[in-house]
Image (cartoon, helix red, strand yellow):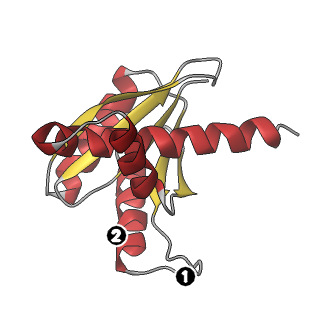
């Protein structure tokens, strides 16, 4: 099944999708939208375009596992997204994914404006890879 991951940001929201075998996660772009309702509509449209069977929204929990304001916003977004699509929407703990995305970009020497443009979709890809790994380990 194809799965889409969403790394929601205030301005830019990164998207990634996996292949039907759930093996390869790939970034598919960034949506620049501040309005949460319009963003949810655009993400729902992308999910339908890519024919995904599940949407995973990153949940930025605090390091101690508690929910802060960012996590609450992401939960609100996921609920709103669920109103715009029949595709199941789930939350996934995304602690440290942005840090991982920056580390990946450091290793590949991506800097400046180019970095700003891709960090969100790289973060979405990191979220999706972690989710796919979890699914592989917990098939039963």
Q: Quadrant of residue 118?
A: top left
Split into 4 quadrants, where in the image is the N terminus? top right
- Name the residue at 16% across, 55% down: 11
Split into 4 quadrants, where in the image is the C terminus? top right
- Residue 84 placement (x, y as % from top left): 34, 44
Q: Earlier in the sequence, mark 1 or mark 2?
A: 1
Tell me if residue 78 can be seen: yes
92 above or below 84?
Answer: below
- Name the residue at 18% across, 40% down: 117
- Residue 55 placement (x, y as % from top left): 49, 41
- Residue 57 placement (x, y as % from top left): 46, 51
Q: Quadrant of residue 122?
A: top left
66 above or below 13?
Answer: below
Q: Are marks 1 and 2 in contact (CB under 8 Å)?
A: no
Q: Quadrant of residue 139?
A: top right
Residue closest to the eye, 69 or 125? 125
Tell me if residue 85 can be seen: no
Does residue 12 appear to the left or right of 8 in the view shown?
left
Q: Which mark is residue 73?
A: 2
Q: Residues within 10 Å of mark 1 (few under 14, many from 20)?
A: few
110 above or below 75?
Answer: above
- Name the residue at 29% across, 44% down: 119
Q: Which residue corresponds to mark 1? A: 66
Q: Nearer the viewer, mark 1 or mark 2?
A: 1
Does residue 6 appear to the left or right of 11 in the view shown?
right
Q: Residues within 10 Å of mark 2 (few under 14, many from 20)?
A: some
- Residue 33 placement (x, y as % from top left): 14, 49
In what element is the residue under mark 2?
helix
Residue closest to the eye, 81 or 91? 91
């Amino acid at each position: 099944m194809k799965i889409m991951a969403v790394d929601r940001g205030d301005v830019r929201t990164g998207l990634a999708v996996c292949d039907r075998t759930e093996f390869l996660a790939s970034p598919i772009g960034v949506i620049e939208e501040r309005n949460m309702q319009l963003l949810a509509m655009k993400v729902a449209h992308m999910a339908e375009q890519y024919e995904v069977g599940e949407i995973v929204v990153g949940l930025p929990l605090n390091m101690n596992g508690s929910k802060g304001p960012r996590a609450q916003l992401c939960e609100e977004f996921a609920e709103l997204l669920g109103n715009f699509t029949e595709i199941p929407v789930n939350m996934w703990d995304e602690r440290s994914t942005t840090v991982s995305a920056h580390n990946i970009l450091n290793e590949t020497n991506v800097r400046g404006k180019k970095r700003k443009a891709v960090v969100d979709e790289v973060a979405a890809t990191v979220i999706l890879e972690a989710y796919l790994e979890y699914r592989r380990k917990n098939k039963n």
